Amino acid sequence: MSTDRVASLLPGSFELVVLHSVSQYLSPAEFDRTAALFNRLLQPGGVLLVGDVVPPGASAISDSLALLQFGWRDGFLRAAAVGLVRTALSDYRRLRARVGLTRYREQEMADKLAAAGFAVTRAPSNLGHLTTRMTFLARKVP
């Protein structure tokens, strides 16, 4: 569901919102607006899970190798390799090179979520196969 459609919902509509592998595609200002929107939509004590946050220094090469390892380990190596080749030949690669990804240090993301009204903890591991990325649990402060 798009954030435009979600914005029309009543406050307190959700107990949990998962925002996975999205923060890197939003500008810092867009992320702030999105976090504030989800704060409004969460019930008191509800959780915003922000996963796959890209830290400074993470590279496309290490992400690609991690995907191939994940594919090898879980039996979809061929599909992972084909997906990487398609991505390399697509407009996404050129767009990522031109625009880049929004990256956050741990404290920067924690500060952004706190400013939106959340009590923040970093999860011990990322929700996903990329161990270099971060996941945050942001509980709505009543």
Image (cartoon, rainbow, N blue to C red):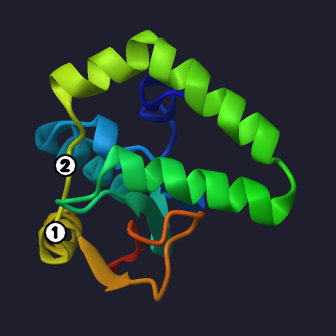
**Residue 32 image label:** 2
Which residue is painted at 77% across and 58% down in the image? Answer: 72
Q: Residue furthest right?
A: 75
Q: At numbered mark 2, what does the secondary structure look like: helix, strand or loop?
A: helix
Q: Nearer the viewer, residue 41 or 55?
A: 55
Mark 2: few, some, or many residues within 10 Å (few <14, many ≥20)? some
- Whether residues under marks 2 and 1 lie with C-beta atoms below 8 angstroms apart, the answer is no
**Residue 105 image label:** 1
- Specify the quadrant that holds the C terminus: bottom left
Q: At numbered mark 1, what does the secondary structure look like: helix, strand or loop?
A: loop
Query: What is the x, y in percent for residue 138?
Result: 38, 74
Q: Nearer the viewer, residue 110 or 35?
A: 110
**Which quadrant holds residue 98?**
top left
Which residue is painted at 28% across and 58% down in the image? Answer: 58
**Does residue 101 appear to the left or right of 88 in the view shown?**
left
Distance from disc 2 to disc 1, alpha carbons, whole Å, reads: 15 Å
Nearest-to-viewer mark from 2 and 1: 1
Query: What is the x, y in percent for residue 121?
Result: 34, 86
Which residue is painted at 17% across and 60% down in the image? Answer: 56
Q: Is residue 15 above or below residue 67?
A: below
Q: Is residue 95 visible?
A: yes
Type of amino acid under label 2 = Asp
**Which quadrant holds residue 29?**
top left
Q: Is residue 13 visible?
A: no
**Residue 21 image label:** none
**Which quadrant holds residue 111?**
bottom left
**Does residue 82 appear to the left or right of 8 in the view shown?**
right
**Does residue 82 appear to the left or right of 136 in the view shown?**
right
**Mark positioned earlier in the residue sequence (2 or 1):** 2
Count of numbered circles in the view: 2
Type of amino acid under label 1 = Arg
Query: What is the x, y in percent for residue 53?
Result: 35, 59
